[in-house]
Amino acid sequence: MDIKYLSRKFVLSMILGIIATIFIVTGRITESQFGIVIMATVISYIVSKTIDKKFSDAKTTYTKIIDRIESLFSREFIVSLVTVIGISYLCYAKYIGSDLWMQVVFAVGSVYNIFNSVEKAGN
């Protein structure tokens, strides 16, 4: 049983979308910052899935859900997740400004999504 919603790209994109939504509702970021982060996340996710479909000829399937969950936690994913959650906390607690938050999550989300697929396509 393979659960597609437990992919690293999907989880990271959803976390970014949820955090950005919370931040826009609470007034921590502007509409422009929200739009940039959401567009970058969605566009990079779509591009990465397109790369996966075009160049990936071998699909990994997991027979047990625990195997799928364990496969989520690569070092790159953990660093990306900790960065996104950490910088989001700093922005929410007003230790940093929303511009810095937007720049970091924009870079982490879009680069992770696309280069994860490029790396898989190269194998």
Image (cartoon, helix red, strand yellow):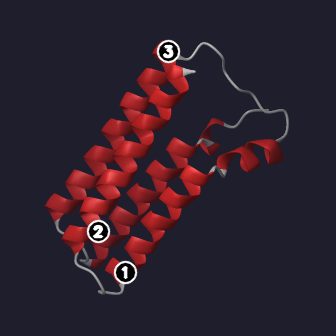
- Amino acid type of the residue that numbered disc 3 sits on in the rendered structure: Phe
Label 2 SS:
helix
Image height check: is 7 above or below 30?
A: above
Question: Which of the two labelled residues, at mark 3 and mark 1, occupies the earlier sequence position?
Answer: 3
Quadrant the C terminus occupies: top right
Task: Report the amino acid beneath label 2.
Answer: Trp
Closer-to-camera residue (47/108): 108
**Rendering coords of residue 47 (x, y %):** 36, 29
Which residue lies under the disc numbered 1?
90
Is there CB contact under 8 Å for labels 3 and 1? no
At 30% from the left edge and 54% from the top edge, which residue is drawn?
106
Asked whether the residues under the numbered discs 2 and 1 touch, taking CB atoms below 8 Å apart as contact, a structural biologist would say yes
Q: Which residue is mark 3?
A: 55
Look at mark 2 in the image and give the residue it sits on: 101
In this rendering, position of residue 7 left or right of residue 106: right
Q: How far, Cα to Cα, is label 2 from label 1?
A: 8 Å
Q: Compare marks 3 and 2 and give the one earlier in the sequence.
A: 3
N-terminal-most mark, 2 or 1: 1
Q: Is residue 91 above or below residue 107?
A: below
